Amino acid sequence: MPSRSTPLAVLLVVVIVTAGCLGSPAPGTGTGTVTDGTPTPTSSPTPTSSPTPPSETPTYTPPGTEYASEQPDASHSVTVTNDWNRSVTVRVTVVREATNETVYEGTHDLDAGEEQVVYDTAEADPDGIERFTITATAVNATESVTIETSLCYGNAYVEITSDGELYPYYAIC
């Protein structure tokens, strides 16, 4: 004779297995179907307005001053440095982006520890703030950096690191 607890255990298992399946979805979550086969509408989140971004420029500029990025500075030197423990040949090209003109192209043999200033953007006589791309090729690699002729940009450097890697960089405010 079966025990009385067996139907109760079976009922408990059925309830546990079907938990969450017997009810309808919570309002606003997913799509379900109504008994007539039509989809249940879902609610969409209400868009909220985002705060107005702060002005990109300050509202007050002291008389007689400008931002460094807005002030032209034609002179930025390009320096090649070899920090590696052997000699290396570095090819440097400088392109004036406003005219797409190659304003400098040269190949430099540098001994270990040697440094050379190879070009200055003032030689191109830039008209205000202009962009110059410096491309260097050495140790089976080619890398580039782009600088602007503003007070915010410093000089450009092409370095062969102590590990023998090509590393062009520049200073910026």
Image: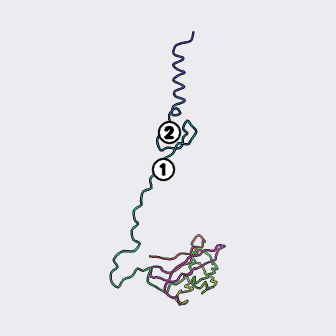
**Alpha carbons under labels 1 and 2: distance apart:** 15 Å
Span highlighted in magenta in the image? 125-154
Determine the residue positioned at 51% across, 23% down: 12
Residue at x 54%, y 30% (from the top left corner): 18
Callout 1 amino acid: Ser
Q: Relative to 104, is 68 on the left or the right?
A: left
Question: Splitting the image into 4 quarters, where does residue 158 fall?
Answer: bottom right
In-front residue for pair 3/39: 39
Q: Which residue is mark 1?
A: 44
Say left or right for 78 vs 52. Answer: right
Total count of labels: 2
- Between disc 1 and disc 2, whose residue precedes? 2
Question: Which one is nearer the viewer's eye here, 39 or 169?
Answer: 39
Category of crowding for the residue at label 2, using alpha-carbon neighbours closer than 10 angstroms: few (below 14), some (14–19), many (at least 20): few
Q: Secondary structure at mark 1?
A: loop
The residue pinned by badge 2 equals 25
